[in-house]
Image (cartoon, rainbow, N blue to C red):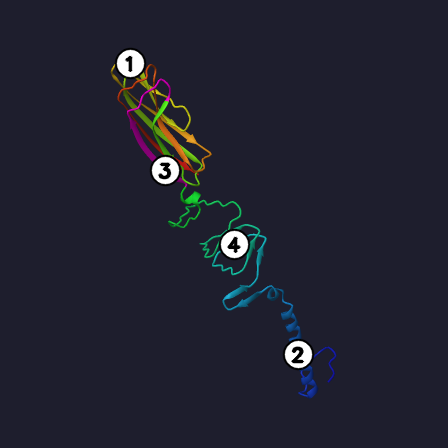
Protein backbone atom coordinates (compact mmCIF):
# COMPACT_ATOMS: atom_id res chain seq x y z
CA UNK A 1 0.00 0.00 0.00
CA UNK A 2 1.56 3.28 -1.12
CA UNK A 3 1.92 6.18 1.30
CA UNK A 4 3.55 9.26 -0.21
CA UNK A 5 3.10 11.33 2.97
CA UNK A 6 4.57 8.89 5.49
CA UNK A 7 3.27 6.08 7.62
CA UNK A 8 -0.15 7.38 8.77
CA UNK A 9 -2.33 4.37 9.36
CA UNK A 10 -2.61 0.66 9.79
CA UNK A 11 -0.36 -1.32 7.53
CA UNK A 12 0.33 -4.94 6.91
CA UNK A 13 3.32 -6.34 8.71
CA UNK A 14 5.24 -6.75 5.53
CA UNK A 15 8.92 -6.29 4.98
CA UNK A 16 8.55 -2.96 3.23
CA UNK A 17 6.48 -1.53 6.11
CA UNK A 18 9.13 -2.43 8.69
CA UNK A 19 11.78 -0.89 6.46
CA UNK A 20 9.99 2.42 6.34
CA UNK A 21 9.60 2.39 10.15
CA UNK A 22 13.28 1.69 10.62
CA UNK A 23 14.16 4.52 8.25
CA UNK A 24 11.99 6.93 10.25
CA UNK A 25 13.60 5.84 13.55
CA UNK A 26 17.11 6.18 12.11
CA UNK A 27 16.25 9.64 10.77
CA UNK A 28 15.07 10.70 14.24
CA UNK A 29 18.27 9.34 15.76
CA UNK A 30 20.34 11.34 13.26
CA UNK A 31 18.43 14.52 14.08
CA UNK A 32 18.87 13.98 17.83
CA UNK A 33 22.59 13.30 17.39
CA UNK A 34 22.93 16.47 15.33
CA UNK A 35 21.19 18.48 18.03
CA UNK A 36 23.47 17.02 20.70
CA UNK A 37 26.59 17.78 18.68
CA UNK A 38 25.54 21.38 18.12
CA UNK A 39 24.05 22.00 21.57
CA UNK A 40 25.36 25.44 22.68
CA UNK A 41 25.11 24.65 26.38
CA UNK A 42 27.18 21.49 26.10
CA UNK A 43 29.75 23.31 23.94
CA UNK A 44 30.08 25.89 26.73
CA UNK A 45 30.68 23.19 29.32
CA UNK A 46 27.19 23.36 30.78
CA UNK A 47 25.48 20.10 31.61
CA UNK A 48 22.76 18.61 33.77
CA UNK A 49 23.07 16.03 36.52
CA UNK A 50 20.68 14.67 39.17
CA UNK A 51 22.12 17.28 41.55
CA UNK A 52 21.43 20.20 39.20
CA UNK A 53 23.18 22.24 36.52
CA UNK A 54 26.96 22.03 36.17
CA UNK A 55 28.93 24.95 34.62
CA UNK A 56 32.44 23.87 33.72
CA UNK A 57 33.62 27.12 32.09
CA UNK A 58 33.57 30.88 32.76
CA UNK A 59 30.23 32.48 33.63
CA UNK A 60 29.63 36.08 32.57
CA UNK A 61 26.64 37.81 34.18
CA UNK A 62 25.86 41.25 32.71
CA UNK A 63 22.69 41.83 34.70
CA UNK A 64 21.61 41.37 38.29
CA UNK A 65 22.31 38.01 39.93
CA UNK A 66 20.12 37.00 42.89
CA UNK A 67 21.21 33.84 44.72
CA UNK A 68 18.80 32.70 47.44
CA UNK A 69 20.36 29.29 47.98
CA UNK A 70 23.82 27.77 47.89
CA UNK A 71 26.14 28.58 44.99
CA UNK A 72 29.40 26.81 44.15
CA UNK A 73 31.68 28.39 41.54
CA UNK A 74 34.65 26.22 40.52
CA UNK A 75 35.80 28.41 37.61
CA UNK A 76 36.13 32.11 36.86
CA UNK A 77 33.01 34.20 37.47
CA UNK A 78 32.55 37.70 36.07
CA UNK A 79 29.63 39.78 37.32
CA UNK A 80 29.07 42.99 35.38
CA UNK A 81 26.00 44.10 37.32
CA UNK A 82 24.74 44.06 40.88
CA UNK A 83 25.32 40.92 42.95
CA UNK A 84 22.49 40.44 45.45
CA UNK A 85 23.02 37.78 48.12
CA UNK A 86 20.07 37.33 50.48
CA UNK A 87 21.72 34.59 52.53
CA UNK A 88 25.14 34.00 54.01
CA UNK A 89 28.19 34.13 51.72
CA UNK A 90 31.25 31.99 52.44
CA UNK A 91 34.52 32.43 50.53
CA UNK A 92 36.98 29.58 51.12
CA UNK A 93 39.57 30.76 48.57
CA UNK A 94 41.40 33.98 47.87
CA UNK A 95 39.21 37.02 47.23
CA UNK A 96 40.42 40.18 45.50
CA UNK A 97 38.40 43.40 45.56
CA UNK A 98 39.78 45.91 43.08
CA UNK A 99 37.30 48.69 43.80
CA UNK A 100 35.68 50.32 46.80
CA UNK A 101 34.03 48.09 49.43
CA UNK A 102 31.29 49.38 51.73
CA UNK A 103 30.56 47.34 54.86
CA UNK A 104 27.39 48.53 56.57
CA UNK A 105 27.36 45.88 59.29
CA UNK A 106 29.91 44.64 61.81
CA UNK A 107 33.25 43.39 60.47
CA UNK A 108 34.58 40.64 62.75
CA UNK A 109 38.15 39.44 62.23
CA UNK A 110 39.97 36.81 64.29
CA UNK A 111 43.15 37.95 66.03
CA UNK A 112 46.38 37.62 64.11
CA UNK A 113 44.96 37.33 60.57
CA UNK A 114 45.86 40.83 59.29
CA UNK A 115 49.26 40.90 57.58
CA UNK A 116 49.18 44.61 56.69
CA UNK A 117 51.40 46.55 59.12
CA UNK A 118 49.33 49.72 58.84
CA UNK A 119 46.23 47.83 60.00
CA UNK A 120 47.84 45.40 62.44
CA UNK A 121 49.95 48.08 64.21
CA UNK A 122 48.69 51.56 63.35
CA UNK A 123 50.16 53.11 66.53
CA UNK A 124 53.38 52.66 68.49
CA UNK A 125 54.62 54.25 71.72
CA UNK A 126 57.93 55.17 73.31
CA UNK A 127 58.98 57.00 76.44
CA UNK A 128 62.22 58.07 78.03
CA UNK A 129 63.52 60.02 80.98
CA UNK A 130 66.87 61.30 82.18
CA UNK A 131 68.59 63.81 84.42
CA UNK A 132 71.82 65.69 84.98
CA UNK A 133 73.39 67.66 87.82
CA UNK A 134 76.36 69.90 88.64
CA UNK A 135 76.07 71.95 85.46
CA UNK A 136 76.73 75.68 85.16
CA UNK A 137 73.65 77.73 84.32
CA UNK A 138 74.73 80.35 81.74
CA UNK A 139 73.01 83.50 80.54
CA UNK A 140 72.08 81.92 77.16
CA UNK A 141 69.77 79.01 76.39
CA UNK A 142 71.50 75.72 77.20
CA UNK A 143 70.19 72.16 76.90
CA UNK A 144 70.72 69.78 79.81
CA UNK A 145 69.36 66.34 80.78
CA UNK A 146 69.10 65.34 77.10
CA UNK A 147 67.25 62.15 76.09
CA UNK A 148 66.17 60.50 72.81
CA UNK A 149 63.09 58.66 71.54
CA UNK A 150 63.56 56.01 68.85
CA UNK A 151 61.37 56.30 65.76
CA UNK A 152 60.14 52.81 64.78
CA UNK A 153 60.42 51.71 61.16
CA UNK A 154 57.41 52.47 59.00
CA UNK A 155 56.13 55.41 61.06
CA UNK A 156 56.29 58.92 59.65
CA UNK A 157 54.51 61.01 62.32
CA UNK A 158 54.77 61.46 66.06
CA UNK A 159 52.95 63.35 68.80
CA UNK A 160 55.53 64.14 71.48
CA UNK A 161 54.88 65.40 75.01
CA UNK A 162 57.79 66.51 77.22
CA UNK A 163 58.36 67.96 80.69
CA UNK A 164 61.58 69.60 81.86
CA UNK A 165 62.36 70.74 85.40
CA UNK A 166 65.46 72.34 86.96
CA UNK A 167 66.72 73.69 90.26
CA UNK A 168 69.88 75.74 90.82
CA UNK A 169 71.56 78.07 93.33
CA UNK A 170 72.03 81.73 92.58
CA UNK A 171 75.73 82.41 93.10
CA UNK A 172 75.52 86.10 92.19
CA UNK A 173 75.19 88.95 94.65
CA UNK A 174 71.73 90.04 93.51
CA UNK A 175 68.26 88.49 92.94
CA UNK A 176 68.20 86.69 89.59
CA UNK A 177 65.67 84.69 87.52
CA UNK A 178 66.10 81.06 86.44
CA UNK A 179 64.30 80.17 83.18
CA UNK A 180 63.32 76.54 82.43
CA UNK A 181 61.52 74.81 79.55
CA UNK A 182 61.16 71.47 77.74
CA UNK A 183 62.56 71.41 74.20
CA UNK A 184 61.57 68.85 71.52
CA UNK A 185 63.95 68.67 68.58
CA UNK A 186 65.33 72.02 67.45
CA UNK A 187 62.20 74.11 68.05
CA UNK A 188 62.68 76.73 70.76
CA UNK A 189 60.52 76.02 73.78
CA UNK A 190 58.39 78.27 75.91
CA UNK A 191 59.98 78.90 79.30
CA UNK A 192 58.78 79.35 82.85
CA UNK A 193 60.85 81.11 85.51
CA UNK A 194 61.53 81.46 89.22
CA UNK A 195 63.50 84.10 91.11
CA UNK A 196 66.25 83.34 93.59
CA UNK A 197 67.77 85.81 96.00
CA UNK A 198 71.54 86.01 96.36
CA UNK A 199 72.79 82.57 97.46
CA UNK A 200 69.20 81.30 97.26
CA UNK A 201 67.70 78.56 95.11
CA UNK A 202 65.20 78.72 92.25
CA UNK A 203 63.01 75.91 90.89
CA UNK A 204 60.94 75.85 87.69
CA UNK A 205 59.18 73.34 85.42
CA UNK A 206 58.25 73.71 81.76
CA UNK A 207 56.38 71.50 79.28
CA UNK A 208 56.03 71.20 75.52
CA UNK A 209 54.17 69.21 72.87
CA UNK A 210 54.79 68.88 69.13
CA UNK A 211 53.44 67.07 66.11
CA UNK A 212 56.35 65.86 64.00
CA UNK A 213 55.86 64.75 60.38
CA UNK A 214 58.08 63.37 57.63
CA UNK A 215 59.90 60.99 59.98
CA UNK A 216 61.89 58.08 58.61
CA UNK A 217 63.70 56.18 61.35
CA UNK A 218 66.32 57.84 63.55
CA UNK A 219 65.62 59.47 66.89
CA UNK A 220 63.82 62.46 68.38
CA UNK A 221 65.87 64.56 70.79
CA UNK A 222 64.29 66.03 73.93
CA UNK A 223 65.99 68.10 76.62
CA UNK A 224 65.50 70.63 79.40
CA UNK A 225 66.40 74.18 78.41
CA UNK A 226 67.84 76.49 81.13
CA UNK A 227 69.41 79.94 81.47
CA UNK A 228 69.56 82.89 83.89
CA UNK A 229 69.23 86.59 83.21
CA UNK A 230 72.40 87.40 85.21
CA UNK A 231 75.21 85.07 86.01
CA UNK A 232 76.37 82.48 85.36
CA UNK A 233 75.21 80.41 88.33
CA UNK A 234 77.98 78.04 89.32
CA UNK A 235 76.49 76.50 92.44
CA UNK A 236 74.62 73.19 92.86
CA UNK A 237 72.16 72.40 90.08
CA UNK A 238 69.93 69.54 88.91
CA UNK A 239 67.58 68.95 85.96
CA UNK A 240 65.19 66.19 84.82
CA UNK A 241 63.57 65.49 81.45
CA UNK A 242 60.66 63.13 80.74
CA UNK A 243 58.98 62.52 77.39
CA UNK A 244 56.47 60.24 75.70
CA UNK A 245 55.77 59.81 71.97
CA UNK A 246 52.84 58.37 70.05
CA UNK A 247 53.96 57.25 66.58
CA UNK A 248 51.57 57.15 63.62
CA UNK A 249 51.99 55.81 60.12
Real-space CA distance between mark 1 and mark 3, rounded to the nearest whole angstrom: 43 Å
Real-space CA distance between mark 4 and mark 3, rounded to the nearest whole angstrom: 48 Å
**Nearest the eye: 163 or 4:** 163
- Quickly name the residue at label 3: 125
Looking at the rendered structure, the secondary structure element under dot 4 is strand
Q: Quadrant of residue 138?
A: top left
Of discs 1 and 2, which sits in the foreground?
1
Q: What stretch is highlighted in magenta?
A: 122-141
- Quickly name the residue at label 4: 66
Real-space CA distance between mark 4 and mark 2, rounded to the nearest whole angstrom: 44 Å
| Crowding near the residue tagged with mark 2, few <14, some 14–19, many ≥20 C-alpha atoms within 10 Å | few
Q: State the quadrant of the N terminus.
A: bottom right
- Quickly name the residue at label 2: 26
- Quickly name the residue at label 1: 172
User: Seen in the image, is 118 located left or right of residue 40?
Assistant: left
Residue 59 marker: none
Q: Residue furthest bottom?
A: 14
Looking at the rendered structure, the secondary structure element under dot 2 is helix
Of labels 4 and 2, earlier in sequence is 2
Is residue 126 a member of the stretch shown in magenta?
Answer: yes
Q: Are marks 4 and 1 in contact (CB under 8 Å)?
A: no
**Nearest the eye: 240 or 27:** 240
Looking at the rendered structure, the secondary structure element under dot 1 is loop
Amino acid sequence: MADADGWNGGRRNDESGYGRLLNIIRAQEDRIAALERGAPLRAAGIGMSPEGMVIGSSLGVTGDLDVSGGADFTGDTTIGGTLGVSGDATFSGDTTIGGNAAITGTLSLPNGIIDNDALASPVEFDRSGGGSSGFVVPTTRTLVASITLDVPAGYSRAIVFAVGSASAQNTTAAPTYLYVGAQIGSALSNLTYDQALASGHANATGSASRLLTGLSGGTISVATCVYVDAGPWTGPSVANTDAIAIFLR
